[in-house]
Image (cartoon, coloured by chain):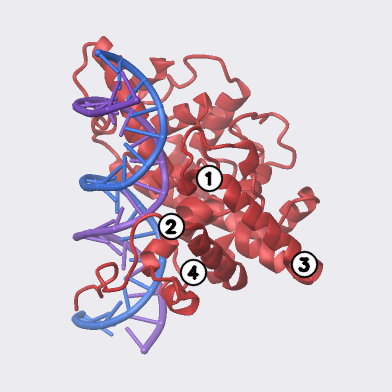
Chain colours: A red, B purple, C blue
Amino acid sequence: MGRPPCCDKIGVKKGPWTPEEDIILVSYIQEHGPGNWRAVPTNTGLLRCSKSCRLRWTNYLRPGIKRGNFTEHEEKMIIHLQALLGNRWAAIASYLPQRTDNDIKNYWNTHLKKKLKKLQGNDEQNQDGNSVSESIPKGQWERRLQTDIHMAKQALCEALSLDKWNTNLPDSKPFPVDLPQTKPIQTSTYASSTENIARLLQNWTKKSPNSSSSESTTQNSFNNPSLGTSSSPSEGTICATTPEGFDSFMGFNSSNSDVSQSEGEPKFDAANFTPETGILQGESKTNLDIQMPLTLLEKWLFDDASAQGQEGYLMDMSLGETADLF
DNA sequence: AATAGCCTCAACCGCAACTGC
DNA sequence: AGCAGTTGCGGTTGAGGCTAT
């Protein structure tokens, strides 16, 4: 009937992961791909529950995770996505492929919430950070639906674009880890030492036998976890977090975005969209057509990326109250 | 130098959603 | 349809680092 006991088992280890455990876990995932988490503790001998293994992988070990300071652009995205979607961190994370939902959630709770509160306090508005979304009672289900559609579409696009990525990224590594350039800001504990994992991952790519022949499978399995073991529709979220694939496909890079040149990207006619109706109109018409241009939100964000530095770019949104934060 | 309070974030918990039978 | 097992998600916690005194 009830859920099986997971983390309250005797002998199940809790707390911070050790390097050894990380190695075991990543080795296993390299071999079998992510998924089937239930079997991971059994097959690896890790004294961790399946949940803990999955969390460790998705929030920390997964290749391509960007750590450290959030850029201003990322901040903007989070604030507005939060306003749009509420505390749906996984959905928000799907727009920030290098960030995990946990990271975004933490960043929101520790930084942005305060920032908003402060700024809104200056405006003599007694609202906490969450109330931004609460101030828009209408269409919550619509936004939810929109996000789900977006994730599904994104997953589909990625699945169909793998070949393109591979050709676009001739020197892409099986583990596209950009970790060394994103040093953790402060902590020296292992849990924050991404270099360890980067080294780990690089070693695996080297020692991986017949890497040339099996590269595509391995790479796909890592770059796009949903392909290997997809069993859940919400895998789109994970799929969407594929870092390089996402970047190359979307022409998006949070730190250095150049959207205007996105070659081969479907053309988007922003004029046909209005903030309130564009999303749903576009989505309902297209029925997940992968030739469908970017959603309004994506377009909107890309426009921002290309015109970074311009203020007031978000005022068109119905949630304009956050637009003047920066 | 000591330490108290604050801050950050990795990890945990519990519920919801999903899937297969 | 209903149950059991699995996975995903969001809220919360607490250990450890940082900062002010």
Q: In the image, what residue type sits under mark 1?
A: Ser
- Marks 1/2 in contact by CB < 8 Å: the verdict is no
What's the CA distance linking mark 2 and mark 4?
19 Å
Q: Chain of mark 1?
A: A
Residue denoted by label 4:
A35
Q: Quadrant of residue A52?
A: bottom left
In the rendered image, the vertical position of residue A132 relative to residue A16, given as above or below: above
Residue, x 64% and y 43% (percent of image)?
A: A178
What's the CA distance linking mark 1 and mark 4?
25 Å
Number of numbered discs visible in the structure rendering: 4
Q: Chain of mark 4?
A: A
Q: Earlier in the sequence, mark 1 or mark 4?
A: 4
A59 or A128: nearer the eye?
A59
Residue denoted by label 1:
A193
Q: Secondary structure at mark 2?
A: loop
- Marks 4/3 in contact by CB < 8 Å: the verdict is no
Q: In the image, what residue type sits under mark 2?
A: Trp
Q: Secondary structure at mark 1?
A: loop
User: For the C terminus of chain A, which image quadrant?
Assistant: top left
Q: Earlier in the sequence, mark 2 or mark 3?
A: 2
Q: Percent position (x, y) of residue A44?
A: 49, 75
Q: Earlier in the sequence, mark 3 or mark 1?
A: 1
Q: Chain of mark 3?
A: A
What's the CA distance linking mark 3 and mark 1?
27 Å
Residue denoted by label 3:
A211
Residue denoted by label 2:
A17
